[in-house]
């Protein structure tokens, strides 16, 4: 059986040597999906043209792009021409877009092969991997645990080696939570670095598509391919106006942590009751490694952070408008999320989705909307003020203060705020999302039970390249990522 390379650089070396063809690599990944995904349930729709796409690349004579022959998976809220795009909703299972999203066009132009669409909770409105369309997605490190949401399928598939890399979307942490739970690098880019045209919206000012990959270099290569101006998304103008953030094209500075000033947001570093002590241990080990690499660590804090995050949580104020706009644009059979909820094709736990469907269609009629926008600006100023006051290179904290939770805990309502004895999902990813700042999650260790733990670096807008350089060095100085033991876990030799 063909041994698959672990990163894009290794794959490109094989192609240059002539040892393998794109068709062989794509076929091998499709076989892994066939063998392993029935228990993971990460893939919702295969691209039936994947082998044809691979054959065209093998036969082509044009210069090879940076993603030549790289098999990738795409979250199912991102339009793909001729391949169903349902945003996790059973009510939209038959919806097939006529055109690719802008980011998919760019991936194809860079040489990527789209293998499949991946699972997500309905309209990306959950921290967990379950949907009305495809059911429960499982974590490849432990099938009894959750891969995180909302880019659940992308996270599980890439971690399991069903694809070299994948694309997710991040509105509140939907790239970084699965990255943390599945031992991956996840990049939430500056909003507008990657076009959102053809992506189902959730909170327009926060929505940011980005990569999930097994290494920082692979994630950066994918991000570079997706970055660019799109007249259908005005937010992308700053992606090309100089100085714009380069990622993969220019060499990253080595040992970026040496001399860097890292703000440690101690108030969210897994130190409150209910947080996981193994996560706290990995945090301290990672901070020690950063200090030994030459970084200066400065403890910082944000006053009233919990209140600010609560008051800038915009889903109930504008998600109905933004989702409805996407439904209309894409030619979906429904034009209002309320119509989809009325079909009752939902999971019983989709409380946020039901609440959004009952919210005002125009957020400007909600007095709290304007106040939320004001407080978002205040939150942005608070974060930027820390960078200015302490001359910071980045903020640092664990992406999530627990490892991947069990499906039993999730189904019992452990993180359902309407259930007794529950608690809010202990994620720190809302900070970058609701401030619309870029952030990178990098796996830096594991619990005693072998579950991945991710550390997050938050940077200033349009400083994505600097953030990626720091993440590259953090990856270098912390324990190497351990792949899930799929043979033992799934009983397969794939």
Image (cartoon, rainbow, N blue to C red):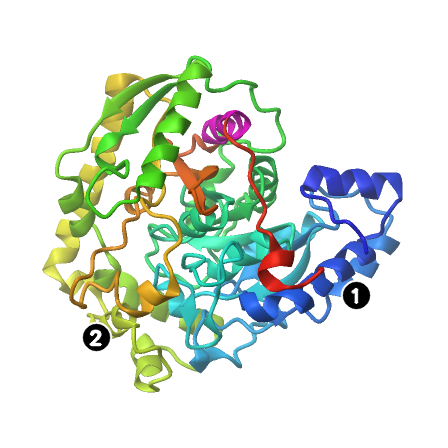
Q: Is residue 44 visible?
A: no
- The answer to which of marks 1 and 2 sits earlier in the sequence is 1
Image coords of residue 220 (percent x, y): 57, 38
Q: Residue at x 39, y 70 (%)?
A: 122
* SS assignment for the magenta stretch, majority: helix
Q: Residue at x 28, y 35 (%)?
A: 269
Compared across the picture, whether 114 is left or right of 103 comes to right
In this view, which residue lies farthest toward the bottom?
Answer: 343
Compared across the picture, whether 14 is left or right of 337 comes to right
As drawn, the label of residue 236 is none
- The residue lying toward the viewer, choosing from 407 and 201, is 407
Image coords of residue 221 (percent x, y): 61, 39
User: In the image, is residue 473 part of the stretch drawn in magenta?
Assistant: yes
- Asked if 222 appears above or below 394 in the picture, the reply is below
Q: Residue at x 35, y 59 (%)?
A: 127
Image coords of residue 88 (percent x, y): 45, 71
As drawn, the label of residue 52 is 1
The boundaries of the magenta stretch are 466-477
Q: Which residue matches tag 2?
A: 358
Residue 351, quarter of picture: bottom left
- The residue lying toward the viewer, choosing from 146 and 202, is 146
Where's the C terminus, which quadrant?
bottom right
Image coords of residue 160 (percent x, y): 60, 55
């Amino acid at each position: 059986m063909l041994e698959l390379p672990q990163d894009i650089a290794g794959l490109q070396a094989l192609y240059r040597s002539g040892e393998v063809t794109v068709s062989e690599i794509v076929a091998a990944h499709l076989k892994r999906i066939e063998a392993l995904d029935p228990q993971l349930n990460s893939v919702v729709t295969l691209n039936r043209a994947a082998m044809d796409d691979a054959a065209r690349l093998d036969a082509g004579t044009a210069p090879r792009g940076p993603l030549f022959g790289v098999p990738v998976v795409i979250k199912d809220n991102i339009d793909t021409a001729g391949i169903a795009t349902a945003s996790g909703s059973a009510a939209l299972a038959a919806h097939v877009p006529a055109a690719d999203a802008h980011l998919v066009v760019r991936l194809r132009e860079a040489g990527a092969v789209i293998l499949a669409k991946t699972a997500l909770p309905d309209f990306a409105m959950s921290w967990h991997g379950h949907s009305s369309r495809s059911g429960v997605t499982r974590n490849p490190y432990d099938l009894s645990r959750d891969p995180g949401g909302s880019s659940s399928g992308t996270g599980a598939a890439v971690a399991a080696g069903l694809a070299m890399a994948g694309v997710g979307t991040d509105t509140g942490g939907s790239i970084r939570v699965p990255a943390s739970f599945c031992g991956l690098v996840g990049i939430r880019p500056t909003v507008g670095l990657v076009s959102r045209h053809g992506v189902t919206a959730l909170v327009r000012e926060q929505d940011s598509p980005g990569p999930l990959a097994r290494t920082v270099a692979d994630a950066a290569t994918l991000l570079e391919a997706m970055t660019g101006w799109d007249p259908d998304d005005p937010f992308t103008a700053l992606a090309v106006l100089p100085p714009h953030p380069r990622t993969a094209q220019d060499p990253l500075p080595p040992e970026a942590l040496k001399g860097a000033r890292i703000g440690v947001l101690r108030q969210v570093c897994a130190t409150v009751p209910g947080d996981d002590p193994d996560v706290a241990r990995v945090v301290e080990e990672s901070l020690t490694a950063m200090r030994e690499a030459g970084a200066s660590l400065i403890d910082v804090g944000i006053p009233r952070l919990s209140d600010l995050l609560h008051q800038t949580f915009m889903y109930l104020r504008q998600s109905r408008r933004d989702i409805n706009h996407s439904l209309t644009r894409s030619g979906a059979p429904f034009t209002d999320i309320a119509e989809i909820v009325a079909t009752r094709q939902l999971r019983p736990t989709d409380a946020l989705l039901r609440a959004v469907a009952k919210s005002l269609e125009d957020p400007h009629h909600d007095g709290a909307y304007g106040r939320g926008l004001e407080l978002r600006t205040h939150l942005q100023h608070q974060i930027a003020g820390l960078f200015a006051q302490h001359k910071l290179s980045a903020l640092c904290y664990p992406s999530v203060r627990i490892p991947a939770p069990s499906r039993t805990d999730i189904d019992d309502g452990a993180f359902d705020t309407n259930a007794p004895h529950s608690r809010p999902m202990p994620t720190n990813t809302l900070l970058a999302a609701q401030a619309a700042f870029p952030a990178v999650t990098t796996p830096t260790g594991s619990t005693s039970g072998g579950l991945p733990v991710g550390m997050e670096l938050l940077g200033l807008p349009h400083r994505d390249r600097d953030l990626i350089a720091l993440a590259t060095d953090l990856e270098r100085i912390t324990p190497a990522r351990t792949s899930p033991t799929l043979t033992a876990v799934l009983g397969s030799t794939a």
